[in-house]
Image (cartoon, grey):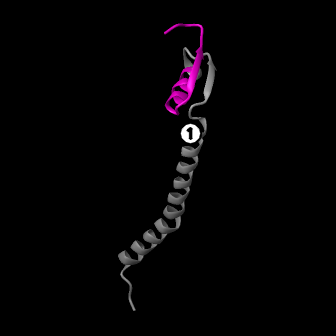
Amino acid sequence: LQFNRNRMSDFRVNSLWATIGLPLGILSFFVYLISRKKKEQVKDKVVFITGASSGLGEACAEVFYDAGCKIILSGRQVK
């Protein structure tokens, strides 16, 4: 029996994708579910953020607000 080299390399690539791609897909699905659950845990909570006028405090304020938290902001500058 003679195998066509292109078919054999296609088989190797397909088996590689099945070996690596499937577990990564399942892992990313579980990460998505966990992050969704964490977002639900902070919904309607009150968060006090200092330094919210710029930098990390401002970024945290946006993330918590998008997650559904009630936020109290404190900073030196009024924007």
Q: Which structural element holds mark 1? A: helix
The answer to whether 45 is drawn above or below residue 54 in the figure is: below
Which residues, given as a range, are shown in magenta? 58-79
The answer to whether 44 is drawn above or below residue 31 in the figure is: above
In the picture, which quadrant includes the N terminus? bottom left
Instruction: Give yes or no for residue 70 being in the magenta stretch.
Output: yes
* Image location of residue 15, percent across then percent down: 47, 71
* Image location of residue 7, percent across then percent down: 37, 77
The answer to whether 60 is drawn above or below residue 41 in the figure is: above
* Image location of residue 67, percent across then percent down: 52, 33
Picture mark count: 1
Give 46 or 16, whichever is nearer the viewer.
46
Give the amino acid at mark 1.
Lys
Residue assigned mark 1? 39
Left or right of 50 in this view: 16: left
* Residue farthest bottom in this picture: 1
Instruction: Give yes or no for residue 75 being in the magenta stretch.
Output: yes
Q: Name which quarter of the figure residue 54 lies in.
A: top right
Give 29 or 38, whichever is nearer the viewer.
38
Residue at (51% x, 26% y) in the render: 62
The answer to whether 16 is drawn above or below residue 55 in the figure is: below
Residue at (61% x, 30% y) in the render: 45
* Image location of residue 51, percent across then percent down: 61, 15
Residue at (50% x, 64% y) in the render: 22
